[in-house]
Image: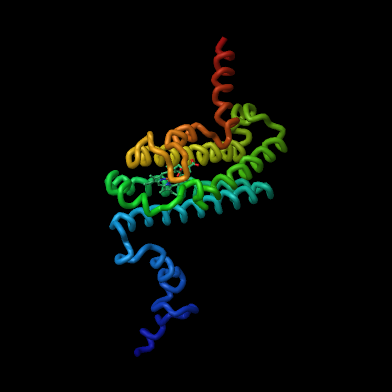
Amino acid sequence: MSEVEDSFEPVLPGTAASDYERYLRTDELLALQKAPDELTHRDELLFMTVHQSSELWLKLAAFEVETAADLLGGGELAGALRLLRRAHDCMKNATVALDMLEHMSPWEYTAFVRPLLGHGSGFDSPGFRGVRRVSPLLGQAFHRLRRNADLSVVELYRQGRQHEELYQLAEALVEWDERVTLWRVRHFKVVERIIGAGAIGTQGTPVELLGKLIHNRLYPELWEVRNELTELAKKEEW
Ligand code: HEM
């Protein structure tokens, strides 16, 4: 072997053929889906790929939001904003990933894939649980900063230019809230399209309830302020 070829030999610990495979643990990752001879229905690979990749995007989103909340605790608004922009895009990716599921035929999914899931339910998704766990931490960190600046939510929105970073932070929270809702909306439509709005989930939850969860808000006060501003603007017109 020439010296040049030798310099590209793997240097990281592990047994895989290259450093790419060793660092990214691709052997383990690609063994996490059923092998072709284990598939009961070929769409299982699509189903597992969408779910497993969604878990990764949701995990990364929760990680970024949790770190953003910690940074806010230390007064680092710009750093937190940078991470929140990443979290927004993670949620976008998880939402777009749902498109793939509509390539499955409703009959083949309900007759062949769904019976394989046991009591498996999205309510047990570690990624989405992470999203639900960290979102209130972000809200608390924001409101602490707002109170320290001696501002109500309405005042912050009216005087946005004097408190630029805090205002941008409030809008980043609204964006996060909206992204989570858009995921829920998209998920609900996929579920409706595949098993029907009248179906009952694998853990006994009527699909109809998923439609209701769309109205949940992570930071209701940041939505309510828009109504208050509209009212105030109307009054000031007089
Ligand atoms: C064929 C595609 C899918 C179907 C038919 C489906 C069906 C359902 C149903 C019926 C529920 C209500 C709970 C229950 O199971 O009883 C649910 C909840 C949920 N599913 Fe799915 N799902 C699908 C894809 C996905 C994907 C790709 C994810 C990504 C992680 C996911 C994550 C969740 C989450 C997080 C919940 C709880 C929702 C919330 O709290 O708003 N699902 N799903």
Q: Quadrant of residue 25?
A: bottom left
Residue drawn at x 29%, y 48% as measured from the top left: 104
Image: 89 above or below 227:
below
Q: Residue furthest top?
A: 238
Which quadrant of the rendered structure holds the N terminus?
Answer: bottom left
Number of numbered discs present?
0
Which corner quadrant of the image does residue 2 belong to? Answer: bottom left
Q: Nearer the viewer, residue 144 or 189?
A: 189
In which quadrant is the C terminus drawn?
A: top right
**Closer to us: 6 or 38:** 38
Residue 154: image quadrant is top right
Residue 105 location (% of width, % of height) = 27, 46
Residue 70 in the figure: left or right of residue 117: right
Colour style of the rendered protein structure: rainbow
Identify the residue at horizontal 30%, vertical 66% (top origin): 37
Residue 45 placement (x, y as % from top left): 33, 58
Taking the spot 34% from the left edge, 45% from the top edge, the residue there is 99
Q: Nearer the viewer, residue 200 or 49?
A: 200
- Residue 237 image position (x, y, % from top left): 55, 12
Q: Residue at x 52, y 38 (%)?
A: 177
The quadrant of the rendered image in which ligand 1 is seen is top left
Q: Position of residue 100 (x, y in %)?
A: 32, 49
In front of the other: 95 or 115 = 115
Q: Is residue 146 left or right of residue 171?
A: right
